[in-house]
Amino acid sequence: MKPAVLTGEHFMTGDVACAEGALAAGCRFFGGYPITPATEIAEHISGRLPEVGGTFIQMEDEIAAMASIVGASCAGVKSMTATSGPGLSLMLENIGLAICTETPCVVVNVQRAGPSTGLPTQGAQGDMMQARWGSHGHYEIIALSPSSPQELFYQTIEAFNLSETYRVPVLIMTDEMIGHLSERVVIPEAKAIKTVSRPRARGRKDRFKPFEPGPNGVAPMAIAGEGYRVHITGLTHDERGYPDMTVEGQEGMMDRIVGKIRNNLDHIIQTESYRLDDAEIIIVSYGVSARTSLAAVDEAREQGIKAGLLRLITVWPFPEEKIRELAARVKGFVTVEINLGQIHLEVERSARGLAPCVLVGHAGGTIITPDRVLKALKESF
Amino acid sequence: MTQTTKQIHHPLDDLLRTDRIPHIWCPGCGIGTAFASCLTAMKASGIDLKKTVMVSGIGCTARGAGYVMLDSYHTTHGRAIPFATGMKLANPELNVVVFSGDGDLFAIGGNHFIHGARRNVDITVVCVNNLNYGMTGGQVAATTPLYSKTTTTPAGNPDGPFNLPLMAYAAGATYVSRWTILHTRDMTESIKDALLNRGFAFVEVLSPCPVNFGRRNKESALDSLRLYQEKTIIKNDAHPTELDIDFDRGVILGKFVDIERPTCIDRYDSTCRPPELFNEEKAA
């Protein structure tokens, strides 16, 4: 067996760092389907997984890829897929299955410009709302957005840990720029990497209820073949897992799958602040756009504008409280993202009219330059 | 005289979620018979039931997963096979049985079926074919006979149906058979063989749907059974190209394919795993 954790200093792309992060997190099943600009994740992990006792399969489409990872996770193996916009569109129904059946799994979206086939080789951040609401019905989801290959490595581990902790699919909403960017990535020793596994079923097999929540609202999970003989369905179900076609049944199930996220926001949400303490104008950004915004903050400060950056590491659930707190004391927010206003709307909603909100957006295909951000900082407020 | 009341048990009770009975299947429907055959075959085959999983998609037949006292996964429409594929590859010790209907497996899920067979994933697929979409009220399916009436082909179906065993054979399944729910013993034996076949095993079971298909085609449940009795012929090893369903000409039943070839996992291990690791695993 070769090492799953490639301890050392590397020069690698974000896509490869993502694959290595998955292996370090304990991912041992990947169901994939080729799509630019995410293909390199599948290519890299297809060679690595069999070396560490895992399994890779290229399925017939993204629908099947997503179904296969939900199945593999139900069989007890940490599982992942990676795709881009058109593939995510196809995966959404089975992402909903994972949400409803509370099956941990990780889905990476290396975003490219859409809609439709769009600009396959050029990046964007246009799928943020799709990540939040794309599958039908109401639900809560977790989505992370890394700003460098190094962070993609760590956030992939974090995505698995959150997914296993809360039994929810976790989306890594990266972008073509970060996915294809080659940079130094430092991989620590295996023992320095914290990995989490899902809470497991214990106790009498005949009395086990697969959806009876534990103390943090998350139910312990029985794995196929352990002897619990569970029934798992995408129909609305009760704590026994049995279909329950009533309004009360729907309410109970929704309370559980929504509540386990909403009641643990403090444990889930991560943001990073840059020169925020005395900031009067706050840039809200994520992924590659947060990175290009950094230069704008420094430049603005040099020109006497008190700018700061709130970088969203967790995009969903949205750090609403944080924005609201800041809104009370700042002149305004500038949301920088490669779309025509998605997270911008969330910032605006969370600011509740206490501070004006401006979008620096782009239809997709390239980064947003620091100049454009600086211009907005200078002219907006 | 004293009357003693005796609890009546069904011989399959140990494999049923009895607290979920009565089931949803209509009077005259054949799915219950196919389901009972499947459970009987599971017991008779000697496979480890603790390690046996039933996976289904969406539809009337797919509800079987909700009644079986096994680890059971009722997934999304058409996606039982890729879900089962992930499950089997993640834990090869599991016996994975897909129990679903013709609409689920061959229209929305048709692509997954052929790829499962091509890869020779070691799972068993039992398809109850009632020639239409029963759960949604009787719409045309990829298996509906030419000219049959359904709610979405009120003037008759202008398209012909798939020959399911031919598709399974052509795509690479290692076991292929067809029975009707009237041929209960043959069907049970066949599902047992399919469970024990090491590879992608496929059993098609013809079943009446009197409420949704029969009603619009002047065919009662008993008429269907009469067709199964009078218009079928058992011809093991018949060539799959002969297996079109046309009750005017007669419908061939039997076992058509029963072969061995390396499974998806066999080939993955021997091709993709580093030799030292593969041998180490085999030794263990």
Image (tube, coloured by chain):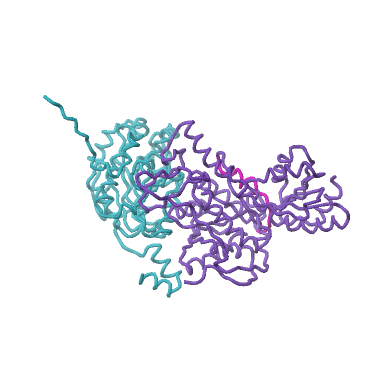
Chain rendered purple: A
Q: Nearer the viewer, residue B68 or B240?
A: B68
x, y percent for residue B105: 41, 47
Q: Residue furthest right?
A: A303
**Residue B145 seen in render:** no
Q: Nearer the viewer, residue B112 or A323?
A: A323
- Give the quarter of the figure containing the C terminus of chain A: top right
x, y percent for residue A25: 54, 61
Q: Say if the magenta span includes residue A67.
A: no
x, y percent for residue B236: 24, 53
Q: Residue furthest bottom?
A: B276
Q: Considering only vertical position in the picture, is A112 above or below B39?
A: below
Left or right of A56? Residue A333 is right
x, y percent for residue A76: 44, 55
Colour in which the image shows chain B:
cyan
Q: Residue furthest front?
A: A215
Q: Residue furthest top?
A: B1
**Residue B176 seen in render:** yes
Left or right of B173? Residue B111 is right
Q: Nearer the viewer, residue A220 or B157?
A: A220
Q: Nearer the viewer, residue B248 or A330?
A: A330
Q: Say if the magenta span includes residue A132.
A: yes
Q: What count of labels does the image hold?
A: 0
Left or right of A186? Residue B273 is left
Q: Considering only vertical position in the picture, is B86 above or below A219?
A: below
Q: Which residues are magenta?
A: A121-136
Left or right of A145? Residue B254 is left
